Amino acid sequence: MWFKHVIPVVAAAALLIGNILPGFAAEGIRLQDIRVRVKDVANVRGARINQLVGYGIVVGLNGTGDSQRAFFTNKALANALERLGMGNLPALNVKNVAGVLVTASLPPFFKQGQQVDVTISSIGDSKSLQGGVLVRTPLRGPDNRTYLVAQGSVSIGGFGVEANGSSVQKNSTTVGRIPNGGIVEAEVPVTLMDENNYLYYSLINPDFSTASELETKVNKSLLGNATAMDAATVRVYVPAAYRTNIVDLIARIENLTLSPAAQPAKVVLEERTGTLIVGQNVRIGPVAVTHGGLIVRIDTTNNVSQPGPLSNGTTTKTSESTITVDEKKGETVNFESGTTVGQLVKALNGLGVPSRDLITILQNIKSSGALNAHLEIL
């Protein structure tokens, strides 16, 4: 079970934080001395990716394509062949073809002829896209305009084998990618500066302190008149000298350096893998934790009574159940204000707390108001 790994991960995370922070102190490094570039924490509004989607068919499959029930695949194949001059064909039943959705993310500023990766996903009852080739497929944006055309051999990064009712599969065989399989046919217009000569920077992680510092840095650099609008947006008025060379202004601003803002204290538990991440600011207020175990065990014994010879009796089945209750003595540990999660885990280990109880204990500490952090369970 994944719970077996939770407490060691917590202890390792707490130990790692405990080792890093004293090292910083020994070297005289403080959080405010660490510098990050504006380009690492903020984006220019308007310079964004665009999601595209299209419907296509994958051919060349070895009998692992859609069945007759996927009528849309047969219809799409007939339409494709008709466009190639094959005439008006009836509905086909070809198991070597699969209907797919083709998706791609088009980065900003990409020009005609540049290439991007595309993702292929089966939408019928195809068993595998292994060895298939995507036929030319237009990908459209929300405005229904074609921006990308995709075609090429599908790479699924896995395999599937089935014979005599037995099967072996690694990774998904109905989702694949075509590296550089999409060619840009139309550019997505990008507007960086609005009609009032303003640029807008959007912080990747909204934070009032970072927005305020970005405003101060831009103003001191004389690159423009900046105003922090909220925790996520900083508006920059573009001087006349840069309005014909907006690229130079953006390049100068994005290389300004900021101090990383102290992030809110947070404990994150990921149940599927047992991963636990603890921020350096996580502290526990005064609290007492009592742990006691109640074990209820029910044992059932089945008895069979056979009738005597020549008695014309029937076999009788009876069950006997034994219930035992074992309650362990609860123990209490007091935690003072400022206790770290690492110290908490060490104390809980001393109590013999099962690892599966750790999440419940942390949730209860949070509910009591003693965990000075956000607790997030994924």
Image (spheres, rainbow, N blue to C red):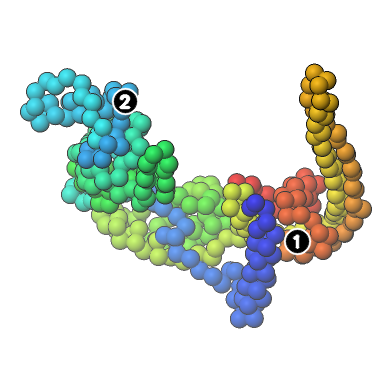
Q: Position of residue 346 (x, y in %)?
A: 77, 64
Image quarter of residue 355: bottom right
- Which disc, if any, is residue 70? 2
**Local secondary structure at mark 2:** loop
Q: Between marks 2 and 1, how big is the CA–CA gap?
A: 55 Å
Work out whether residue 186 can be spotted: no
Q: Compare residues 330 and 209 and report the one nearer the observer.
A: 330
**Percent coordinates x, y for residue 333 in the rendering:** 87, 59
Q: Amino acid at mark 2?
A: Ala
Q: Position of residue 10 (x, y in %)?
A: 68, 61
Inspect the image, locate mark 1, and give the three-letter code of the amino acid beneath it.
Val
Q: Within 10 angstroms of label 1, few (less than 14), some, or many (20 or more) residues?
A: some
- The residue identified by callout 1 is 345
| Residue furthest bottom as drawn | 27
Count numbered badges in the picture: 2
Query: Residue visible at 88% across and 38% down?
Result: 322
Q: Compare residues 229 and 120 and report the one nearer the observer.
A: 120
Left or right: where 58 falls relative to 87: right
Q: Name the residue at 41% across, 46% down.
A: 169
